[in-house]
Image (spheres, rainbow, N blue to C red):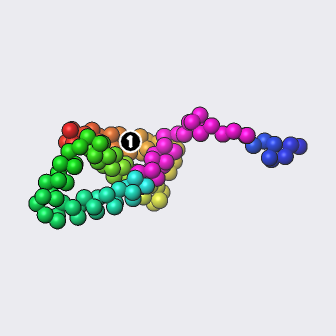
Amino acid sequence: MPSVAAERPRYLNLFRIRLPVTGVVSLAHRVSGVVLFLAIPFGVWLLERSVSGEQNFAATLALLQQPVIKLLTLLVLWSLAHHFFAGIRFLLIDVDIGVDKQTSRNGAWLVLAAEALVVLALLGWLL
């Protein structure tokens, strides 16, 4: 009988692992939470800067019109939309709604569709 250590792979290529849609939604929920957490200081800085005078308000508006900042804003808004919809899905799973395999898959696809609709609407608003 071979030992457990001999059965383990020596090299695990994470790019070749195909997660099911439920795993993708779960992973993206965690990533979106991290993005939202990291965006808090920048958001507080923008708020503080925008309310500290007319010149700073104008400068903040000009900063928010930069293409890179618009892209970052879209990323944060995508994170917010995904985290919101996936969070609702996970709360429903916590109360035993949508725990079977097919319903869980359908819920994950619904989360992805809802966030895509929100991001498309926000994309039109941002550009």
- Residue 25 highlighted magenta (yes or no): yes
The local crowd at label 1, few if under 14, some if 14 to 19, many if 20 or more residues have their Cα within 10 Å, is some
> Which residue occupies 59% across, 34% down?
16
Q: Split into 4 quadrants, where in the image is the C terminus?
A: top left
Q: Position of residue 35 (x, y in %)?
A: 40, 53
Residue 92 visible in the snapshot: no
Which of 120 and 39 lies nearest the eye of the viewer?
A: 39
Which of 82 and 108 lies nearest the eye of the viewer?
A: 82
For residue 116, side relative to residue 63 (left or right): right
- Residue 81 highlighted magenta (yes or no): no
Q: Position of residue 85 (x, y in %)?
A: 36, 51
For residue 68, side relative to residue 60 (left or right): right
Residue 61 visible in the snapshot: yes
Q: Position of residue 42 (x, y in %)?
A: 31, 58
Badge 1 marks a residue whose secondary structure is helix
Relative to 32, say whether 41 is above or below.
below
Indicate the quadrant where residue 55 lies: bottom left
Magenta-drawn segment? 9-33
The number of discs equals 1
> Which residue occupies 78% across, 42% down?
7
Q: Split into 4 quadrants, where in the image is the N terminus?
A: top right
For residue 125, side relative to residue 75 (left or right): left
Relative to 50, say whether 71 is above or below.
above
Disc 1 target residue: 112
